[in-house]
Amino acid sequence: MDTKGIEQMLSVLRSTAAQASGKPADSSAGVAGVADFSEVLKNSIDKVNDTQKSANQMAEKMVAGDTTQNLHEVMIALQTASVSFQEMVQVRNKLVTAYQDMMNMQV
């Protein structure tokens, strides 16, 4: 699992939390951090989408009678796609919760 994107998202969230609390933020997490966050998020969503498409194509080929498709590989691909989608949903839930917490802060 590639944790580089997750670390970048956490860095952006930490700098935003630091700014909201009035603490000085790292100089590296400025406007570029926001752009990196959106890029990382988009790349992560695209990767999950590609994983699901690939698994579905493998399953369709197997159902169509393609003898090159191994049942075990197809099942692993489908399970990987399912787990990656569930992970994306959990990240989304955490982001929504963080956004709601920030919006409820008293200024």
Image (cartoon, rainbow, N blue to C red):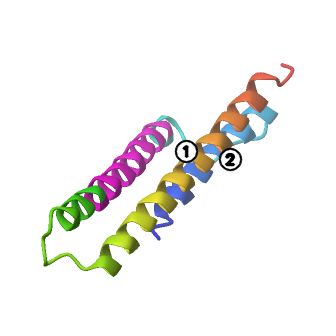
Q: Position of residue 99 (x, y in %)?
A: 68, 31
Question: In the rendered image, is residue 27 in sight?
Answer: no
Write down the residue under mark 2.
14
Nearest the viewer among 34 and 56 is 56
**55 versus 46 height, above or below:** below
Above or below, comparing residue 40 to residue 60 in the picture? above
Going by the picture, which residue comes out furthest to the right? 106
Residue 53 appears left or right of 107 = left
Between label 1 and label 2, give the one nearer the viewer. Answer: 2
Q: Amino acid at mark 2?
A: Arg
Q: Looking at the image, can residue 33 be seen? A: yes
Q: How far apart are the two marked residues, 1 and 2, measured between alpha carbons?
A: 9 Å
Given contact means CB atoms under 8 Å apart, are the residues at marks 1 and 2 in contact?
A: yes
Quarter of the figure with the C terminus: top right
Name the residue at 44% across, 40% down.
Answer: 32
Q: Which three-letter amino acid code belongs to the residue tagged 1?
A: Ala
Q: Is residue 44 located in the magenta-colored stretch of the structure?
A: yes
Q: Which residue is mark 1?
A: 29
The residue range painted magenta reads 34-55
- Of the numbered discs 1 and 2, the one sitting upstream in the chain is 2
Q: Is residue 107 magenta?
A: no
Quadrant in which residue 25 is drawn: top right
Query: Which secondary structure, mark 2?
Result: helix
Q: Is residue 70 left or right of residue 40?
A: left
Residue occupying the point 48% across, 43% down? 37
Residue at the spot 81% in from the left edge and 23% down from the top edge: 104
Residue 10 x, y percent position in the rendering: 61, 52
